[in-house]
Image (tube, rainbow, N blue to C red):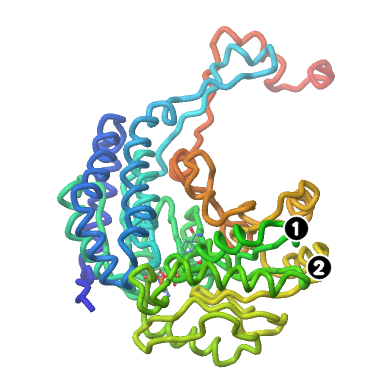
């Protein structure tokens, strides 16, 4: 493991003061400056893609293909597109006022940058989750500290070395470290905090933010259920769900966590999953370079503990290699009180929970916290509508996994326990601006206001 150079805690006040001063001087405001920083961010990702791929691979053997598609590619594309669209996003909006007597007031919304912001990112998609919020902050005209995760030390170290070579260091800084450094950062007063990670730490962040009334975006996780319609194409469903489970070895917030499978097709679905397994990993998953490792020993042991305690029947996989490799593993007949249904699995285990009706599946989902994503595989409009109407979740996706994240025009957000606040493109921008309402009341309107001033007369009250 690489030695992550922690930012000395004694340096934090000076970093904070620099960013404050840059913001106060208005340096981060001009659109041309923001566009340049966005292009520089894209350049950093593009010119150093091999370094980023090597770093993230070193952290947990994440395959290059997944890094290019899920991290480097979207950062380059979204930085450039955000620069292109910035003018449209940032321009003041003239508001269409309905009342005739207010129409001369020039009602306007100004997109004011919130100020100096803090971005705290996790290890599992270390690049996109630290830099996608930064794209929003730059576009909005904020200055920012980015605090990547200490659990992806190669990436975090690489970012700390490269970012200052491309971005204006008076406006954007990387602070590296763990709980101690983050705690010190949280004592400072930020104008917005964007946190991605687990719900336990989110509560620490929210409590710290509350002391300063700092607004928050919380991008959290949880268990994302999959509901299967017995009449769906099981082969395609198996391929798309299993791909969702194997990507990043299941260490994704939007990973399909468990499947509510009609009891009548459970065995046929297992059969379809077995075929997909052979296609994905003909040489066995543990021998494959297409499967990430578990990020660290603590998470590996946590998953081994779930495995030891489950009463589900293993029907596929089940092996581990002692070196943080765990085979994608499918369990059938998993019961409600099983270890695999306790918390977010965040690993390559796929429990199948048999149900006898759509209503039972809906009740199962509604008895638990609102998921980040609800997945369903169905071609039946009534089945689909019942899920839309009778459940709640951050996102609802039909017939595939992850693809909501690929659509630049869709916001991404949790709900309830899976978080709040939106991101991606203009939604990331929106999170870092304040909509500053404004009217400019004409002096000529004065006669119209005559009745509002004291002394209040009976005549005025009856206006
Ligand atoms: P992590 O352990 O890397 O922690 C995230 C950040 O919190 C790190 O920067 C870390 O330094 C900081 N942190 C940890 N403990 C802290 C403390 N006590 N005080 C202050 N800061 C602290 O990552 P993680 O939380 O294990 O990430 C995985 C979780 O994130 C999963 O639950 C996953 O579902 C969720 N997630 C959500 C999204 C999303 O967009 N909704 C994306 C990715 C991951």
- From the image, tell me which residue sits under label 2: 360
Q: Which of the two marks, 2 or 1, is nearer to us in this view?
A: 1
The single residue placed furthest to the bottom in the displayed view is 308
Is 88 left or right of 397, judged from the image as shown? left
Residue 355, label in figure: none
Q: Is residue 423 above or below residue 140?
A: below
Structural crowding at the residue carrying mark 1, measured as other residues with C-alpha within 10 Å and reported as few (<14), some (14–19) or many (≥20)? few
User: Of 424 and 248, which appears nearest the observer?
Assistant: 248
Q: Secondary structure at mark 1?
A: loop
Cβ of mark 1 under 8 Å from ligand 1: the answer is no
Q: Secondary structure at mark 2?
A: helix
Sequence-wise, the earlier of marks 2 and 1 is 1
* Residue under the image location 23 percent in, 71 percent down: 6
* Residue under the image location 61 percent in, 19 percent down: 96
Is 66 left or right of 15, judged from the image as shown? right
- From the image, tell me which residue sits under label 1: 231
* Residue under the image location 29 percent in, 42 percent down: 23
User: Of 372 and 210, which appears nearest the observer?
Assistant: 372
Cβ of mark 2 under 8 Å from ligand 1: the answer is no
Which quarter of the frame holds ligand 1?
bottom left
User: Of 363 and 187, which appears nearest the observer?
Assistant: 363
Residue 234, quarter of the rendered image: bottom right
The answer to the question of whether label 2 and label 1 lie on touching residues, with beta carbons closer than 8 A, is no
Provide residue 9's location: percent of width, then percent of height: 25, 70
Structural crowding at the residue carrying mark 2, measured as other residues with C-alpha within 10 Å and reported as few (<14), some (14–19) or many (≥20)? some
Provide residue 134's location: percent of width, then percent of height: 35, 49
Provide residue 46's location: percent of width, then percent of height: 23, 47
Is 174 left or right of 198, judged from the image as shown? left
* Residue under the image location 62 percent in, 60 percent down: 237
Q: CA distance from mark 2 to mark 1?
A: 17 Å
């Amino acid at each position: 493991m690489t030695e992550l150079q922690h930012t000395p805690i004694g340096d934090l006040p000076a970093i904070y003061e620099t960013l404050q001063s840059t913001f106060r001087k208005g340096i981060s405001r001009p659109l041309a400056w923001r566009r340049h920083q966005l292009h520089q961010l894209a350049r950093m990702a593009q010119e150093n893609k091999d370094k980023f791929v090597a770093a993230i691979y070193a952290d947990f053997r994440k395959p290059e293909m997944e890094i290019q598609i899920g991290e480097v590619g979207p950062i380059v594309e979204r930085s450039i597109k955000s620069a292109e669209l910035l003018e449209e996003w940032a321009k003041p909006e003239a508001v269409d006022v309905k009342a005739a007597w207010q129409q001369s007031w020039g009602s306007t919304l100004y997109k004011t940058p919130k100020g100096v912001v803090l971005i705290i990112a996790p290890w599992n998609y270390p690049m996109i989750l630290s830099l996608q919020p930064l794209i929003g902050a730059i576009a909005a005209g904020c200055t920012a500290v980015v605090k990547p995760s200490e659990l992806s030390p190669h990436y975090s170290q690489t970012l700390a070395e490269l970012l200052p070579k491309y971005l204006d260091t008076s406006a954007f800084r990387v602070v590296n470290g763990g709980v101690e450094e983050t705690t010190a950062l949280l004592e400072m007063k930020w104008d917005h905090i964007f946190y991605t990670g687990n719900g336990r730490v989110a509560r620490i962040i929210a409590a710290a933010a509350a002391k300063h009334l700092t607004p928050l975006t919380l991008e959290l996780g949880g268990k994302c259920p999959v509901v299967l319609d017995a009449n769906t194409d099981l082969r395609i469903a198996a391929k798309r769900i299993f791909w969702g489970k194997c990507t990043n070895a299941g260490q994704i917030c939007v990973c399909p966590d468990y499947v509510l499978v009609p009891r009548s097709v459970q065995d046929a679905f297992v059969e379809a999953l077995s075929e997909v397994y052979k296609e994905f990993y003909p040489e066995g998953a543990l021998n494959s370079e297409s499967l990430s490792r578990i990020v660290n020993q603590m998470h590996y042991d946590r998953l081994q503990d779930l495995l030891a305690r489950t009463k589900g029947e293993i029907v596929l996989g089940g092996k581990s290699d002692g070196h943080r490799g765990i085979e994608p593993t499918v369990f059938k007949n998993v019961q409600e009180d099983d270890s695999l249904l306790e918390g977010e699995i965040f690993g390559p285990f796929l429990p199948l929970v048999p149900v006898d009706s759509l209503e039972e599946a809906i009740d199962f989902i509604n008895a638990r916290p609102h998921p980040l994503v609800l997945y369903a595989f169905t071609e039946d409009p009534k089945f689909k509508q019942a899920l839309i109407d009778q459940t709640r979740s951050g996102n609802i996706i039909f017939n595939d996994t992850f693809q909501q994240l690929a659509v630049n025009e869709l916001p991404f957000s949790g709900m309830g326990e899976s978080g709040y606040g939106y991101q991606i493109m203009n939604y990331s921008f929106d999170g870092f601006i304040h909509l500053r309402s404004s009217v400019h009341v004409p002096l000529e309107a004065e006669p119209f206001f005559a009745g509002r001033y004291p002394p209040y007369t009976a005549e005025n009250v009856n206006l």
